[in-house]
Image (spheres, helix red, strand yellow):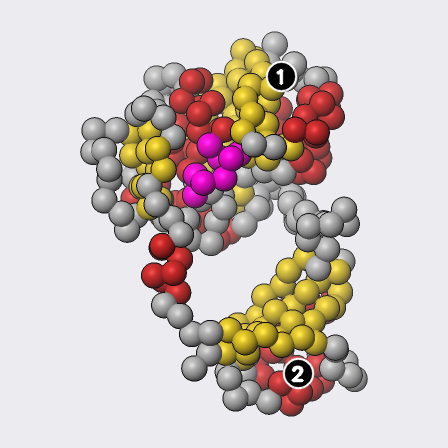
Amino acid sequence: MGWQSVSFLTDASHAEPICDALLEAGALSASIEDADAGTPDEQPLFGEPGSVPSSGWTHSRIVALLEPDADIDALLSEAVAAIGLNEIPAYGVEAVEEQNWVQLTQSQFDPIRVSERLWIVPSWHETPDPAAVNLILDPGMAFGTGSHPTTRLCLEWLERNVSEGCSVLDYGCGSGILAIAAARLGAARVAGVDIDPQAVEAARSNAERNGVAALFADSAQPVAGEYDVVVANILSNPLRVLAPAICAHVRSGGRLALSGILREQAEEIMAIYAQWLPMQVADMREDWVCLAGVKP
């Protein structure tokens, strides 16, 4: 027997209260999504480390998972009344079939060979080449499994640019894959920062799994210091806004790599970063680019 997935639209001010009210009314889970995701109006949520992130998406979609026999109208009525609303919103319903979710998720990830000496291995797989540099990864709820072209671009760049004993900052660390790779490739001081506390927890767990000493923190805690190497695999909008903060952490003579950038966005991002350091296209994969430069 499966479940019912109910979705509806709301605004930023009501999104979190309605989710809490749905859970109180008996929903199994409730999540908030950007209703404009995948459109020109998509609203990235990000914050410079030390700042307070924005409060939510202007146009939010609530997705609630309910028991198969739940009375949807009654549950929604209880939830909206709890936060002072008079009417239940228009909603859609989809059936969610019962599956072995752990097995299904794990089946989507296989070991990935990044280069001759570098592999990404999900924690539930055997290592194909025990003599290689194997990154043992459990992505959890964080971005960064190694399968996305931007992650591959950054890993390949790190392999070429991390030297023994250097310091590395992973800005927007997700699962911690780039920071962990840097440490395994010889970096002596490694740090990572992310806006998502769940990503930070996943990164810490993955670092421990790989026997790596790395400092991971969420963006509520200011990042201090300069680094020999800084890598930021996020999206173009955060890269635009966070350029001063990112560049401030690159020491003179240090290297910076940026990804999460589509080919047609590269010129604009390079122009923004030019006031701190010259950037150029270091590599491409599919429609994505990796930009890199050395700070004067």
Q: Is residue 148 magenta?
A: yes
Residue at position x 65%, y 28% in the image? 263
Most foreground residue, 169 or 126: 126
In the displayed structure, 114 sits above or below 31; it is above
The amino acid pointed to by label 2 is Leu
Answer whether residue 204 is magenta in the image.
no
Can you give x and y, in whole percent of width and height, for residue 54 in the image? 70, 51
Quarter where residue 31 is shown = bottom right
- Describe residue 5's horizontal placement relative to residue 126 as left or right: right
Q: Residue at x 51, y 51 (%)?
A: 197
Q: Badge 1 is on which residue?
A: 280
Side of 180 relative to 142 (left or right): left
Q: Amino acid at mark 1?
A: Gln
Q: Residue at x 23, y 44 (%)?
A: 126
Q: Secondary structure at mark 1?
A: strand
Residue at (54%, 50%) from the top-left corner?
196
The span shown in magenta is 145-152
Around disc 2, counting alpha carbons within 10 Å, would you say few (fewer than 14), some (14 to 19), or many (20 or more)? many
Q: Which residue is mark 2?
A: 76
Q: Is residue 271 above or below residue 241?
A: above
What's the CA distance linking mark 2 and mark 1? 52 Å
In this view, 63 is above or below 175 = below
Q: Nearer the viewer, residue 219 or 284?
A: 284
The image shows residue 174 at horizontal and vertical percentages of 49, 43
